[in-house]
Amino acid sequence: MNSTVALIISAVIAFGVTAGLGFVIIPWLHKLKFGQTILDIGPKWHKKKQGTPNMGGLMFIIGIVLSFTVTVLIYHFSGGKLESEYSSIMNGRELVLLLAGLILALGCGAVGFIDDYTKIKLKRNEGLSPKQKTLGQLIVTLGYITTLWVSHNTSWYIPFLGRVNFEKNIFTAVVFWLLSIFIVYGCVNSVNLTDGIDGLCSSVTATVAIAFIALGYIQGFAGLTIFSGALLGGVLGFLCWNWNPAKTFMGDTGSLFLGGMVVALGYMCKCPIILLPIGIVYVCETMSDIIQIGYFKITHGKRVFKMAPIHHHFEMCGWKEKKICVVFSLVNAIGCVIGVLLLYFGNFAK
């Protein structure tokens, strides 16, 4: 079996399982009364979404994990090699990246699950306190970075500069740890912020998955291609139920899991900084929130946007949710093309 067949199998299984689980999990969530509580501070028209089943992210978590596991086993026993063309140099460290990335995503999803369950249990929309949520995410983040360090997955590709090894001395080691904490924690929460309207996080993440499929082919890393294919199939399968009007929300269970998947992909291709252009919508969502809060505090009540994150600003301007999803996905697709070209022409494939 070649990597293209494995990619197709991975995407199809993830899509089929995720979409199919909607017929089981959504009624189950309804039965348990795991409905979303809508805050009064949000757009007034969101109130009609009150009671829509939350934690639907369980659908694509199951679909992605099952798809990835099955496809890897089939690919392995058919004689395929998951490692990239650099495996002779990296000594198979890509295999650690694959497993650690999946565990990172599951760990982030677990924090989100606890947060969602707390919201439902207490019948309020706050869930875990900011300190509790941050602590949980940092524990998962540090565990992931420790795995990278112990397995010597500390070399990054910098476009037009080449490979940078962070194990040279104490200074570069400190830079690696601090940068990685910022990147992992920041990316996971940026994806989480993007989950604010029906279908937005799923559709944007689909463009990210496609970009990393391309990078998997460029690098010759079948594991990256399969991982990205499972992500693509999972979010597309979820869109069958999450497109406006949504039948279910992914909740923090799903959005934090997707955040872990996305940042893991950045490390799998050994260039996490490429997440800046490839995840440009995530970046804009986060920056709009930071700018809004900062400006509000500095000016004692004034605002830059009608509402933050920025997708709510466009909602307040009269844009329909479907239009926001399409436009934001197209913008992110452009960022993905830029990111792929940067790595390709920046000596990534040499």
Image: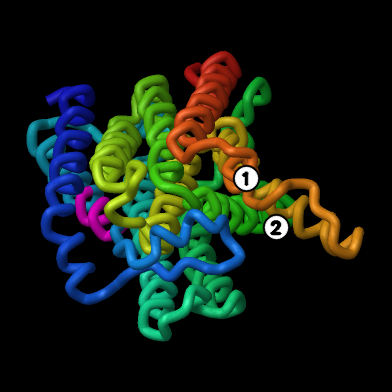
Tell me which label, 1 or 2, sits earlier in the chain. 2
Give the residue pinned by disc 2. Answer: 174
The label shown at residue 223 is none
* Residue 317 % position (x, y): 64, 39
Q: Amino acid at mark 1?
A: Met
Nearer to us in this view, 196 or 5: 196
Which of the 4 image quarters holds residue 90? top left
Residue 60 in magenta stretch: yes
Q: Residue 70, relative to residue 300: is it above or below?
A: above
Q: Is residue 157 above or below residue 299?
A: above
| For residue 342, above or below residue 198 | above
Please say if the residues under marks 1 and 2 sit with CB atoms less than 8 Å apart. Answer: no
**Residue stretch in magenta:** 57-63
Q: Nearer the viewer, residue 145 or 203?
A: 203
Q: Quadrant of residue 70?
A: top left
- Tell me the SS state at disc 2: helix
For the point 42% across and 85% down, the residue is 122
Residue 210 screen position, x and y as percent: 38, 28
User: Residue lying farthest bottom?
Assistant: 122
At 27% from the left and 53% from the top, the residue drawn is 247
Between marks 1 and 2 in the image, the one whose residue lies nearer the viewer: 1
Nearest to the observer: residue 260 or residue 164: 260
What residue is pinned by disc 1? 316
**At 52% from the left edge and 28% from the top edge, which residue is drawn?**
327
